[in-house]
Amino acid sequence: MFKSLLIANRGEIACRVVKTCARLGIRPIAVHSEADADALHVRMAREAGGSAVAIGPPPAAQSYLDIDRIVAACRETGAEAVHPGYGFLSENARFAEALEAAGIAFVGPTPHAIRAMGDKIESKRLAKQAGVNTVPGHPDALDDPEAAVAVAEEIGYPVMLKASAGGGGKGMRVARSAAEVREGLASARSEAKSSFGDDRVLVEKFVEEPRHIEIQVLADAHGNTVHLFERECSIQRRHQKVIEEAPSPFLDPETRARMGAQAVALAAAVGYRSAGTVEFIVDRDKSFYFLEMNTRLQVEHPVTEMITGLDLVELMLRVADGERLPFGQDDLKIRGWALEARVYAEDPVRNFLPSIGRLVRWRPPAETAHVRVDTGVMEGGEISMHYDPMVAKLVTHGPDRTQAIGHMRQALDACVVRGVKHNIGFLAALAAHPRFAEGRLTTGFIAEEFPDGFTGGTLDDLTRTRLIAVLATANRMAVERDRAVAGRLAGTTTTVSEHWVVRIGRENHPVAVRPAAGGFEVLVDGREIPVTSDWQLGEVLFDGRVDGQRLICAVERAGVGWRASHAGAEIDAFVLTPTAARHADLMPDKPPPDMSKYLLSPMPGLLVSLAVGEGQRVEAGEALAVVEAMKMENILRATVPATVAKLHAKPGENLSVDQKILEFD
């Protein structure tokens, strides 16, 4: 086995590879940009007996995508092999060739296989030659908008504009009209160029109401190829996977076997080695169509590891070192069920726009036999505008799907992120959704179930009452602490009242909080609820028994009030004396300021361009500006007819969230 391994990546996948290196006794070598000098993957590599090498400025094109810099880092450190992770150079044949020329092993497929299957155009042609059904589309990349419109109208709307070298949802657009094709082609090409250095874009039929199911394949250099079953990846937003699971709740054993055999045959046809993934669209009749092959490790590989008991990174290393696969297809069995939820720094209530900043607090759930956490960040670290905003992947396992979902719901409730916006509440709402529990999934699930976006989860009346009891308990503990402060005048005594009012919006909930064995007895709206926990003031996470049931929620101060978060929902409340509550009822509501005459930046990012000038009349739906964040271009449009009165920002300017871009009359 290799004695040293350079990991040509960052974030959670770099940390993931370090863990396997540490277990196998391989010296890990991290690389980092200037922005990542103190990143977790750098620290972990050093703690595992390895080292770290600086490879350039923060922009990925000048660091993680710079082949010459990474090869030089290999030479400098004596690395025997390179693991590319996913993204960046993981599917770059020139990178694999450069390593081969330098006498360094590439932990992945051959350059030939990368070119053949990593390119969507070539892989589709080869799939057709192999007799695999493919989605209708044009065989060549298109750069002329009118040619793309002609192809789209020949295929029939809607169509997908897809970067040939793309992945992760970047360089992808769904177009339902000629105008959307023209506009989407330019944006897709621009995103593809900045993300992958390749602006070729395909046009193919967009199959509506599909399932996205992929097959994990593994092959060695001795002609042995197997599949490690499937992953259901239908829960997607903007073509990016949000929740994945293995196996699929949709496939029967016969369909699973046919898809697996087809994936194996396709991999064998190109002499594939290492881990790879063959992606399919599956319709309601279980007919499946080849989409593409990812010639690398997938973000969602942990769910496959959980149901097979295998370490895919270790197997990739062994294959790259020339070993044979230690098992055949008949040796592989599905063991239980696994789910993965991707925790991102993004704002669900602002259409999931990226959120950047410092992680003031980061508390992942405890890892157990049922819960795994893959992360590349640490408390106090920075979510940078230069890279993907992933915070962590939460992975849960259970003997069946219902129990795996239950573990996921608890893990999400136990996950604390502060300092940046995050999608934990949205993930919790998905995991609690009845349709998700039933397994009725399509790639349109999120758009169908949240057509107006995500505004927060909902709580049933009993859960809401229990959370009110927790807030009342927290307030009682805070008051007791304040009354015990030192330095009071001699002879003075104070008592803590049992009676309070939990005020949520304009709702008043009378409560009585009395000490009891192991905690408190809380009377909420006439219902008696015992609360027991070892929770202390200042801790964000409350984990205890409320009304006889285990309850995990975040409890913290919100100004002079309190906030509780659970199952994707938040409660903001004031806990007042009965007299103060009566006075609060008399206070008028203060309306928020009217900002409707401004176009505000919905996210931190770069103002790429302005499409309008002062004095210009615009119509509803007309493009006003393009803001780039996390390598994604976001077009901001007019919502009503208006006249531009003043420009407040210039192209090239870095914008903060809610910064004024322009003003209307």
Image: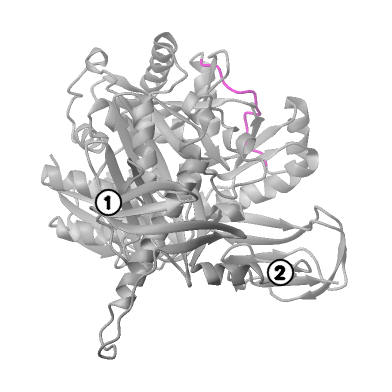
Q: Residue at x 58, y 17 (%)?
A: 284
Residue 162 lies, in percent from the top left, at 60, 39
Q: Nearer the viewer, residue 357 or 160?
A: 357
Is residue 6 visible in this depiction of the protein? yes
By secondary structure, the bulk of the magenta-drawn segment is best described as loop
Quadrant in which the N terminus is drawn: top left
Q: Residue at x 57, y 19 (%)?
A: 283
Crowd around label 2: few <14 · some 14–19 · many ≥20 (10 Å): few
Residue 350 is situated, as x and y percent measured from the top left of the image, at 60, 56
Residue numbers of the magenta segment:
132-142
Q: Amino acid at mark 2?
A: Pro
Residue 313: in magenta span: no
Q: Is residue 493 above or below residue 95?
A: below
The residue at which mark 1 appears reads as 15
Q: Amino acid at mark 1?
A: Cys
Residue 540 vertical position relative to residue 2 in the rendered view, above or below: below
The image position of residue 276, as x and y in percent, is 36, 31
Between disc 2 and disc 1, the foreground one is: 2
Q: Which residue is mark 2?
A: 591
Kindly report the distance in space between the C-alpha atoms of the residues bearing marks 2 and 1. 47 Å
